[in-house]
Image (spheres, grey):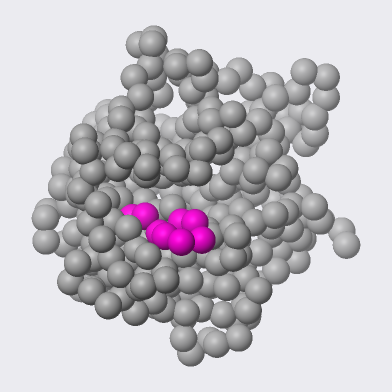
Amino acid sequence: MFCVISTVFLSLLIPSTFGGGCGFQGWEIEPQCGDIPPVSSQSLMVSNDDDLWLILGFKECFNIGICDNEFYPFDTIYKYDTKDNEWEAISVNNPSNVPAPRAFAAVGINEKDEEIIVFGGANYDNFFSSPVFYDDLWKYSIDDNEWTQFTPTNPADGPGQLSLTGLVANEDYAYVFGGFSLFNGFAGNNDLFQYEFATNTWTNLNPANPPPGRGVFGMEWSQKDDDIFYIYGGEFNGGVDLHRDLWEYDISSNTWTEITPTTPQVPSAANYGAFAVTKKDDFFVAFGETNDPSTVCLTNSFVNQAHSLSTTTYVFDDDKWEILETTTFSPQLKRPAYSYNAKRKNIYVYGGVDIRCDPAHQGVDVYNRNMYMFDV
């Protein structure tokens, strides 16, 4: 099958974008065939074997007077085969029993049982009217091609209705951290909950030394230790303030530990970016938006939209952050879907939106349909 590279952003590219070479390191645009998904923001992505799974998300027009801040949430699933570069739109076997369309949910994957786990999220009408936050937990079975909603025996002991939490899962448990509630002014929670699949019970773990509360952050398993996962960054106080800290949670001791770099260089404070834990437990940070007031534009949106960041790509190795010098272009995105594929040792990024606040682009939001890949 003939595959194409999206024409979106082609004006930004240089020839080395389309392939490797001696000393090559950087972002590439992958070819795409088949059922290429519609443009979306804040979709969820997980990896399983050679495949990437793209779930939920939304499209929103930010410019009042042009589109009245229309909001379109999705309940779709797409699969991308990284070997054949082919998308497939998935038609589930039980379409009447699927999660409600939503944005800002959290996702993880039970790789042993090939089950994708989704928690929470939000839906709302134009201009963020009539918001609904969710407290439901679902699994999508890759083998059975169907969704199942978990029914906890103690729902009152669970996280409650939250959006923009973090989630990781294994064959026994799902772990949910942080997030925003309609009832706390988007201040950001710092509770850590465990859901046991065998008993359908929630437990608030109340770990020692918890990080400050937050939403919109990265949360990923260690690639070396099955008892460890990490969080990075996020926002609190309704996005007024941003974190750029890195934390480790140890399941065996039920303890959080902040990882402090040995050098002062750290990534710029940003949210809605990409965070991945790669093969040696190096930490990879890229994209996002800043809260610098000088970069705010689209002020005729119901929520001011900030400039999306170029890909100053950082990796945390040997206890320090380093900027990865790449030989290719730097895509500029916020709210992309992303996943590290351990089999192929690549980071993949799809979707998201580019908002630029310079005079030439003022008031323009450009959705991305490229599949970006970074070989780590």
Q: Residue furthest right?
A: 1
- Is residue 199 rendered to the left or right of residue 110? left
Task: State yes or no: residue 310 in magenta.
Answer: no
When the figure is inspected, residue 297 is found, relative to residue 33, above or below; the finding is above
* The quarter of the displayed image where residue 328 is located: top right
The residue at the point 36 percent across, 51 percent down is 166
Q: Is residue 173 magenta?
A: yes
Magenta: predominant secondary structure element?
A: strand
Above or below — where is 195 with respect to 352? below
Residue lying at 29% horizontally and 36% vertically, measured from the top left: 256
Can the viewer see residue 303?
A: no
* Of 158 and 18, the residue lying toward us: 158
Measuring 61% from the left and 53% from the top, which residue is drawn there?
Answer: 47
Q: Could you tell whether 134 is left or right of 87 in the image?
A: left
Please state the extent of the stretch shown in magenta in the rendering: 169-176
In the rendered view of the protein, which quadrant contains the N terminus? bottom right
Percent x, y of residue 122: 31, 66
Quadrant of the rendered image containing residue 9: top right
Question: Horizontal placement of 220 versus 157: left or right?
Answer: right
